[in-house]
Image (cartoon, grey):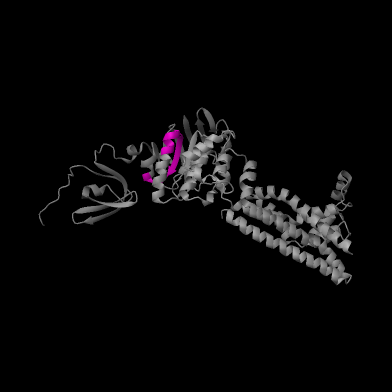
Amino acid sequence: MIKLNFSKKLLGSEGSFDLTINEEIPKERLSILFGKSGAGKSTILGILAGLIKPDSGEIIVDDEVWFSSSKKIDLPPQKRSIGFVFQDYALFPNMSVLENLLYALSDKSDKKLVYEILELTELTSLKDVKPQLLSGGQQQRAAVARALVRKPKILLLDEPLSALDFAMRAKLQDEFLNIQHKLKTTTLLVTHDISEVYKLADFVYELQEGKVLNRGTPSEIFGGVGISGKFKFNGEVVAITKSDILYVVSVLVDNEVVKAVAGRKEVQNLKIGSRVVLSSKAFNPLIISAQPQ
Amino acid sequence: MEDSFFQTMKLTFELAAITTLILLFIAIPIAYFLSQTKWAFKPVIEAVVSLPLVLPPSVLGFYLLLAFSPKNSFGSWLEANFDLRLVFSFEGLIVASVIFSLPFMVHPIQSGLSALPKNLSLAAYTLGKSRLNTLFFVLLPNIRSSLLTGIVISFAHTIGEFGVVLMMGGNIAGETRVASIAIYDEVEALNYDIANQYAMTLFIISFAILLFVYAINRHFMRAEIK
């Protein structure tokens, strides 16, 4: 059981706000903190890792108190069983990939585990290379591998794929999902990318100005439940243009803009930035007049 | 004459080597502290460390001379308790040189540590490593070029100092006469040949040291992230 219940005053771009979190993170699942930048997502990871101190509250992981303002407990990061993957990966440039992993190993006799993780993350052939010579995707894998070496109770990832291009991101998402299913780690990942939420998350917390707006599975939160579509994409409205009696709605799905027609009533509920589900059924109910006007 | 030349050069390099070694041990904790702290009095410490950069060496030498003089309380306390007389002695020269060259060791190490991504040390902490372990296995190995710069510049600067040495050590052959003072001494005695021998030796050694640093640093820079 991972229980987070804390608050901290944060300084945002539009004045200060309170980060107030009272959640339980499901074990052996991949949960995602989703929200705009500045919503406090990364701060939550920092607090969980012991790198940032909350103003008050408590953090309990498997009956072990990591932080409690009332009991005056604040375990340092060294004493918390976490794996942290930083946005810039923070691999040690003076060590090779293998040395980075060995340095992380708390029980030095368990070198077998290091080689297993290298194999799992497909880094065995690159083990003697210094991290600065790796590609972005390889660095990301090395950072995840290093975080897994300590067999952490929670794996924390701070926008781990944001620095990578689209194709690499999709590939690493698949790989990461694969690792997650094999190892069944409890993972908390921060992202502002909605497609990542759909692809990776078992559970998602939508965060706005330091508060959890919604929690649930991705489709519970972002809609799309109950539509029996033949195909179904989640996207974001980027433009709405009027064309005669209809409206053309441009929707960003992954990295492509898809255009769809909509009536006046449907458009009323939409604005640029709205999240929508784009779906089509086998028998498209749209009727188009064949008569010239 | 040859003997005194080698004696003076040996003394000069001994002083520089010992000073550099002591400085390395003192400067790493100071630089680490300054690179990490958000303490309100940080500027005070920085100013004290940097003071030898702007003070005339004779000013520093004068106050050190006063402080360590057995006629004054601190000097007499040192002599009574440690049998240590720092004025006009080799030990005194070391103390003075350490103080005088402190900024040349602290500054490169401090700026090297400050330039490292903060996440490197945070990552080490999340991997269960203590601050000391992180400093020695993650931070210092990644600022090798800064360490080398600090070591070599401090060494070269100690060889080249004049004012502090003259004030604190005087000009005792085999005890406190270093090369820079010997040059002055020989010129005063109109021994231009010997003065030139000292001067040329210092000139060549200084150039060789700097050439070495810049060549090595280029090599390090390629290996490090910048």
Quarter of the picture containing the N terminus of chain B is: bottom right
Is residue B77 in sight in this rendering? yes
Quadrant in the picture for residue B133: top right
In x, y percent, where is residue B31? 67, 50
Q: Which residues are magenta?
A: A178-195
Taking depth in this image into account, of A51 and A207 the one nearest to the observer is A51
In the depicted structure, whether residue A254 falls above or below residue B207: above
Q: Find residue A66 and report its horizontal and vertical position in percent.
A: 54, 33
The outermost residue toward the left is A291
Q: Quadrant of residue B149?
A: bottom right
Quadrant of the image containing the C terminus of chain B: bottom right
The image shows residue A230, relative to residue B180, as above or below, that is: above
How many marks are shown on the rendered structure?
0
Residue at point 60%, 56% (across, down): B221
Q: Residue at x 41, y 51 (%)?
A: A165
Q: Is A183 within the magenta?
A: yes
Residue A16 lies left or right of residue A292; in this view the side is right
Q: Position of residue A38 (x, y in %)?
A: 45, 47
Question: Residue pushed farthest top?
Answer: A63
Q: Is residue A44 visible?
A: no
Q: Is residue B154 magenta?
A: no
The answer to which of B56 and B20 lies nearer the viewer is B20
In the rendered image of this protein, does residue A65 appear above or below residue B131?
Answer: above
Q: Residue at x 74, y 51 (%)?
A: B23
Task: Please give the name of the residue rendered at 85% of the width and 60% of the height, measured from the top-left corner.
Answer: B6
In-image side of A247 versus A15 (left or right): left
Q: Is residue A176 left or right of residue A113?
A: left
